[in-house]
Image (cartoon, grey):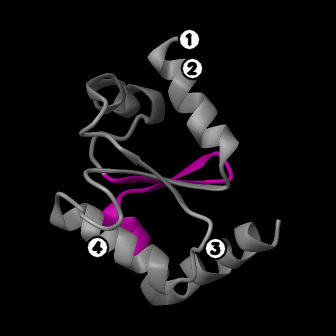
Amino acid sequence: MSVLERIQAEVEGHPVVLFMKGTPQFPMCGFSSRAMRALTEAGATRLHTVNVLEDPEVRANLPRFSNWPTFPQLFIHGELIGGCDITVELFESGELARMISETQAS
């Protein structure tokens, strides 16, 4: 399976996926930490994360897959939502909680 197929499988296999640097317990960059905190506070209990620092192929190819150059990257129902700033903005507006609530019910 190619790396792009593996990324596609991650995105399609989970309702909420965060490609981040580090883990939820130990984020390795401030942006990943802020995105993870926003998701947690928005009620994401069924959240799948991928540590891009553990897989150089995913780290190198995810920007090509998503057409988004930076990390973290949040996908909900297979759709790229964006990075840290967009995730935090959605959280602050209440929209992220609504989106997460829909995924937790499905």
Disc 1 to disc 4, how far (Cα)? Answer: 32 Å
The residue tagged 1 is: 1
Residue at 81% x, 73% y is 105
Q: Decide which of tag 1 and tag 4 comes sooner along the chain.
A: 1
Tag 2: amino acid:
Glu
Distance of mark 2 from mark 3, alpha carbons? Answer: 25 Å
From the viewer's perspective, is 53 left or right of 78?
left
Q: Which mark is residue 34?
A: 4
Q: CA distance from mark 1 to mark 3?
A: 30 Å
How busy is the neighbourhood of tag 1: few (under 14 within 10 Å), some, or many (20 plus)? few
Q: Nearer the viewer, mark 2 or mark 1?
A: 1
Looking at the image, the residue that sits furthest to the front is 25
Measure how far apart labels 4 and 2 are at the Cα level. 28 Å
Residue linked to disc 2? 5
Which of disc 3 and disc 2 is earlier in sequence? 2
Q: Which structural element holds mark 4?
A: helix
- Would you call the spot at circle 2 few (<14 residues within 10 Å), some (14-19), or many (20 or more)? few
Tell me which segment is drawn in magenta.
72-89
Indicate the position of residue 91 as horizontal and vertical percent values.
Answer: 47, 82
Q: Which residue is mark 3?
A: 100
Residue 14: x %, y % from top left: 65, 49
Q: Nearer the viewer, residue 77 or 58?
A: 58
Q: Position of residue 81 (x, y in %)?
A: 51, 57
Q: Residue at x 36, y 29 (%)?
A: 58
Disc 1, disc 3: CB below 8 Å?
A: no
Q: Are marks 2 and 1 in contact (CB under 8 Å)?
A: yes
* Circle count: 4
Q: Earlier in the sequence, mark 1 or mark 3?
A: 1
Crowd rating for badge 4 (residues with CA inside 10 Å; few <14, some 14–19, many 20+): some
Indicate which disc, 4 or 2, sits on the residue closer to the N terminus.
2
Residue 99, quarter of picture: bottom right
